[in-house]
Amino acid sequence: MPELPEVETICRELENKIINNTIIRFEELRDKTFLNPDQLDICSKITSVKRIAKMIVIDLENQNRIAVHLRMTGKLIYPAVDKDVNKHTRAVFYLKNKKIMLFDDIRTFGKINLLKQSDDLRKIQNFGIDPFSLDFNSEFLINKTKKKTEPIKNLLLDQTVIAGLGNIYVQEILFNTGISPLRKSNEISKTEWDNIVSSTKSILLKAIECNGTTISDFRRVDDKKGEFQNFLKVYGKKNCPVCSNELTLIKQAGRSTRYCPVCQK
């Protein structure tokens, strides 16, 4: 957390607020917030804000870029003023319009990379296909999983296979498709993969429409919560919304999984 819809929400909101503004100064308030030691010049006009995998990527007129990975509790806050800086603020970006953008991060796992637009982001984070890519289809997934015996849930969480899916949305996708999270990846049929692809896209789009899911820490750039938590069917729930059977709670790869043993086969 944040997952793809939350990062996409932040990018869309920032895009409407900071494009064509200029960064005139930036300040690191906590060591190792910026990963690269050289810290390229980012005092330049902002030309675009986009999501790549789970990163917020801010491109600059001078051909450099800022790639922000929020990790667990990171958030970008804009617009802000000096009095909004607090003990969790790790970096401050001062803009030409006299507003500031804060990078707050309670657990300090997030990172900011300053790099050139020509640099390969996969060298920073080895990420897989984007769920909204035209190449994200059953053929791609069958090819990726034909030799994999790991549970389907673990496979969908693997960021080197699919970029952006996390624990919340994978549980919702598997429930929506009626597939048990315990099924082996290489035993999923083409029809089931087609359903997973379709369900993935529709659930992510709905979550983006709702500005993401706020369970605990996620906040939008204006510090408001997302609303997709109001539409979750199994994550954090006790009973199946279809058959009313009590949901089974297990651990998979260190993550909690809720599923309905009646509806998910």
Image (cartoon, rainbow, N blue to C red):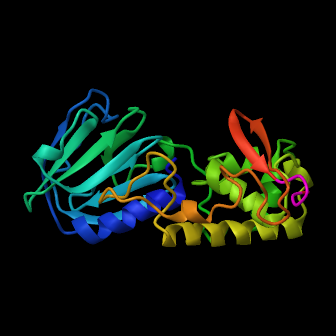
Residue sitting at the far top: 31
Q: Is residue 160 left or right of residue 99?
A: right
Estimate the x, y position of residue 204 in percent, counting from the top left: 59, 66
In this view, 127 is above or below 107: below
Residue nearest the observer in this picture, 259 or 28:
259
Asked if residue 120 is among those painted magenta in the image, a careful observer would answer no
Asked if residue 7 can be seen in this view, the reply is yes
Residue nearest the observer in this picture, 220 or 46:
220
Estimate the x, y position of residue 149 in percent, counting from the top left: 87, 42
Estimate the x, y position of residue 18 in percent, counting from the top left: 23, 65
Estimate the x, y position of residue 19 in percent, counting from the top left: 24, 68
Asked if residue 146 can be seen in this view, the reply is no
Query: Which residue is at 61% across, 50% downward?
Result: 166
Question: What number of labels is visible?
Answer: 0
In this view, 55 is above or below 107: below
Query: Which residue is at 87% across, 70% downward?
Result: 191
Asked if residue 262 is among those painted magenta in the image, a careful observer would answer yes
Residue 48 occupies which quadrant of the picture?
Answer: bottom left
> Which secondary structure type mostly characterizes the magenta part of the structure?
loop
Q: Is residue 112 left or right of residue 254?
A: left
Q: Quadrant of the C terminus?
A: bottom right
Query: Which residue is at 61% across, 66% downward?
Result: 231
Residue 85 occupies which quadrant of the picture?
Answer: top left
Q: Is residue 82 left or right of residue 158?
A: left
Query: Which residue is at 27% across, 53% downward?
Result: 77
Q: Is residue 159 left or right of residue 93?
A: right
Question: What range is drawn magenta here?
Answer: 260-264
Residue nearest the observer in this picture, 92 or 234:
234
Residue nearest the observer in this picture, 45 or 197:
197
